[in-house]
Image: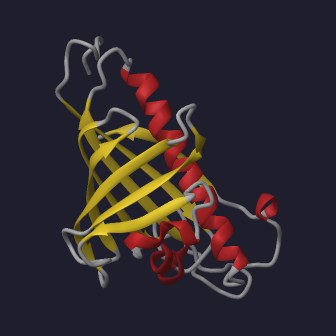
């Protein structure tokens, strides 16, 4: 890592993971609908496909939220282009075309994989059952150029906060659908790993 993000602008990569108590297909059903993030992300006041056909590579979505700026425009907004979508593999990639955040050369991917409780490993022999519901891991990788004047650790914290907000809203959405346990969100166990450099 370079110490000065305002001088060294080479491409950086991060990865964030979140384990959620819900089946993989339920999580992927929400995440894979590229133009409908508003249906589960409460911070997205606007989300619409402005180019192409939803869920077709090449389509572009415009999302905005966070209230209003003094001039009346959305406080936070982003235009993102879908690059690939593998429904069977539960994996998508997309890039930011423009945004209010100042990100450059951004490329991100979302993937849903089995949770550690769903497979035998050195760590656990437990398999899904009535007492141990299935869980899944959402992996988000994020690659971009350093933002001038922003230290890498500060940028990492900001990216982690975006991912945390996404996963909080995703968990709320699947619980509202009644697909997981009826306990409140605060009572349900979940595993959060810190975002790391890749």
Q: Pick the residue in front: 91 or 49.
A: 49
Classify the position of the N terminus by image quarter: top left
Is 71 placed left or right of 91 in the picture? right
Q: Pick the residue in front: 37 or 109.
A: 37
Asked whether the viewer can see residue 122, the reply is: no
Is 169 placed left or right of 103 in the picture? right
- Image quarter for residue 28? bottom left
Classify 104 as above or below 116: above
Residue at 59% over, 65% down: 170
Residue at 47% over, 72% down: 36
Residue at 53% over, 81% down: 26
Classify the position of the C terminus by image quarter: top left
The spot of residue 48 in percent (x, y) is: 42, 67
Is 52 placed left or right of 33 in the picture? left
Q: Pick the residue in front: 88 or 126.
A: 88
Residue at 55% over, 57% down: 44
């Amino acid at each position: 890592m370079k110490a000065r993000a305002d001088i060294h602008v080479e491409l950086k990569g991060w990865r964030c993971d979140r384990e959620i108590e819900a089946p993989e297909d339920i999580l992927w059903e929400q995440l894979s609908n590229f133009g409908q993030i508003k249906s589960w992300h409460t911070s997205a006041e606007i989300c619409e496909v402005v180019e192409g056909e939803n869920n077709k590579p090449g389509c572009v979505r415009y999302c905005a939220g966070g209230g209003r700026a003094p001039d009346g425009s959305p406080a936070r907004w982003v235009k993102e282009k879908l690059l690939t979508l593998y429904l069977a593999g539960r994996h998508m990639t997309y890039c930011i075309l423009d945004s209010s955040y100042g990100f450059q050369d951004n490329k991100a991917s979302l993937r849903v994989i089995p949770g550690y409780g769903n497979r035998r490993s050195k760590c656990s022999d437990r398999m899904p059952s009535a007492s141990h519901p299935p869980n899944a891991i959402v992996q988000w990788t994020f690659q971009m150029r350093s933002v001038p004047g922003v230290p890498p650790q500060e940028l990492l914290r900001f990216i982690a906060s975006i991912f945390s907000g996404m996963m909080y809203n995703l968990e709320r959405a699947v619980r509202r659908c009644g697909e997981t346990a009826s306990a409140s969100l605060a009572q349900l166990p979940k595993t959060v790993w810190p975002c790391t450099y890749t």
